[in-house]
Image (cartoon, helix red, strand yellow):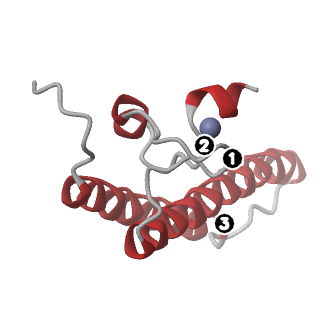
């Protein structure tokens, strides 16, 4: 491990793109589950409704993350990636490595 503070933009872009791909696959799987046939049994239908609520929540999470990824990729394109949107300092590389969509530094995110 090097102790450079520079962000490896091409590695970040790769990570964001593969995460994007993974989320799209997940979303397709969720949508396939949601469009499956319905049971005729009312008790099973109640269970299905409950499952659907979970699936809708998971789909909403995935869509939210896809939006964050798109925003991160656009920040990379316009050169503002890795800069805290709240205070303007460079976001620490370890934070970006753990969460490449981070918009704010740890201090601002926890504030
Ligand atoms: Zn900040």
Q: Position of residue 13 (x, y in %)?
A: 29, 62
Mark 2 Cβ and ligand 1 under 8 Å apart:
yes
Q: Nearer the viewer, residue 104 or 50?
A: 104
Nearest the viewer among 22 and 54 is 22
Q: Looking at the figure, which quarter contains the C terminus?
A: top right
**Residue 88 image position (x, y, % from top left):** 58, 47
**As drawn, which residue projects farthest toward the front?**
88
The numbered mark, 2 or 3, whose residue comes first in the sequence reads 3
Task: Where is residue 87? Give x, y as percent.
Answer: 65, 43
**Distance (Cα) linking label 3 and label 1:** 38 Å
Q: Residue placed at 17% from the left, 25% from the top?
A: 3
Q: Which residue is denoted by mark 3 in the rendering?
A: 34
Name the foreground residue: 16 vs 9.
9
Q: Which residue is mark 2?
A: 104
Image: 60 above or below 90: below
SS for dot 1: loop
Query: What residue lies at 47% left-to-right and 59% top-to-bottom?
Result: 26
The residue at the point 79 percent across, 48 percent down is: 44
Circles 1, 2 touching at the beta carbon (< 8 Å): yes
> Which residue is identified by label 1?
86
Disc number lying in front (3 or 1): 1
> Marks 2 and 3: which is nearer the front?
2
């Amino acid at each position: 491990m090097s102790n450079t503070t520079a962000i490896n933009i091409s590695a970040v872009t790769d990570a964001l793109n593969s995460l994007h791909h993974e989320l799209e696959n997940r979303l397709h799987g969720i949508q396939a589950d949601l469009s499956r046939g319905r049971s005729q049994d009312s008790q099973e239908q109640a269970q299905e409704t409950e499952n659907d609520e979970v699936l809708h929540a998971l789909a909403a999470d995935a869509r939210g993350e896809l939006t964050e990824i798109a925003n991160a990729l656009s920040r990379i394109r316009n050169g503002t990636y890795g800069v805290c949107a709240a205070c303007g300092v460079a976001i620490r590389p370890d934070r970006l490595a753990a969460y490449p969509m981070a918009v704010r530094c740890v201090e601002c995110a926890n504030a």
